[in-house]
Image (tube, grey):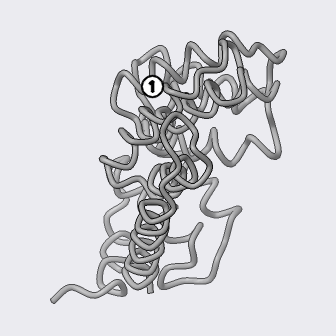
Amino acid sequence: MIFKQQIYNWLIENQNDSNSIYLLGYFNYYGIETKFNEHRAIELYKRAAELENKVAQLCLAEIYIEIDGNLSFKLSNKLANKEYAFGINNLGICYENGIGTNVNEEKAFEMYQKAADLGNVSGINNLSWCYYEGIGTDTNKQKVFELYQKAADLESLDGINSLGWCYEKGIGTNIDKQKAFELYQKAENLEAQLFWLNV
């Protein structure tokens, strides 16, 4: 059996490719077998990103949403141009919220649609929210329901919860309190499983 400490030690000794560099940054960012060290994590993510590691670039884009919107937008745009679904979704977030660019709800909707078409669960959930709120498109409660159903079918915690909400409130479907309860219960159980996997 391999333990986290063994993996951490191996990563320290094998900083010769972008995946190992990124993963060591991940361990530092989340305090796995080391103390949480955001500065060290960012440095490692930057090194991996310079080696064209898409996951490291995405992590930086997400971190920079709060501290450097322009850089977050630039990295997200770079990933979107490479057809990386997570980057496309992140670019949608930038357009929706004016991060590193002007607010452009139509462009946000377009990015979420593109990410959803590539099977990105966050893109599917964000696209559904656009249809609910009328962000860059007309409201369409039936599409809200269908998209949350699709996200739930992909075992998305947010999708399952949101589908429960649709059944509870009758959004795009008939009110079904029992179905809503079952979905909320399923989401709670999934969340508990994810918690124990991360312990």
111 w.r.t. 28: above or below: above
State left or right for residue 120 relative to residue 173. left
What x and y, as percent, mark residue 160? 44, 55
If the image is split into quadrants, where does the C terminus sit? bottom left
Residue visible at 72% across and 28% down in the picture: 133
Position of the N terminus by quadrant: bottom left
Q: Is residue 52 left or right of residue 136?
A: left
Residue sitting at x 54%, y 24%: 112
- Above/below status of 144 relative to 13: above
Query: Viewer-proximal residue, 49 or 182?
Result: 182
The residue where tag 1 is placed is 115
Residue at 35%, 58% (x, y): give it: 20
Between 190 and 40, the one lying in front of the other is 190
Residue 48 at x, y percent in the picture? 46, 45
Q: Nearer the viewer, residue 130 or 171?
A: 171
Q: Quadrant of residue 74?
A: top right
Of 180 and 131, which appears nearest the observer?
A: 180
- Circle 1: residue type: Ala
Q: Residues within 10 Å of mark 1 (few under 14, many from 20)?
A: many
- What secondary structure is found at the residue carrying circle 1? helix
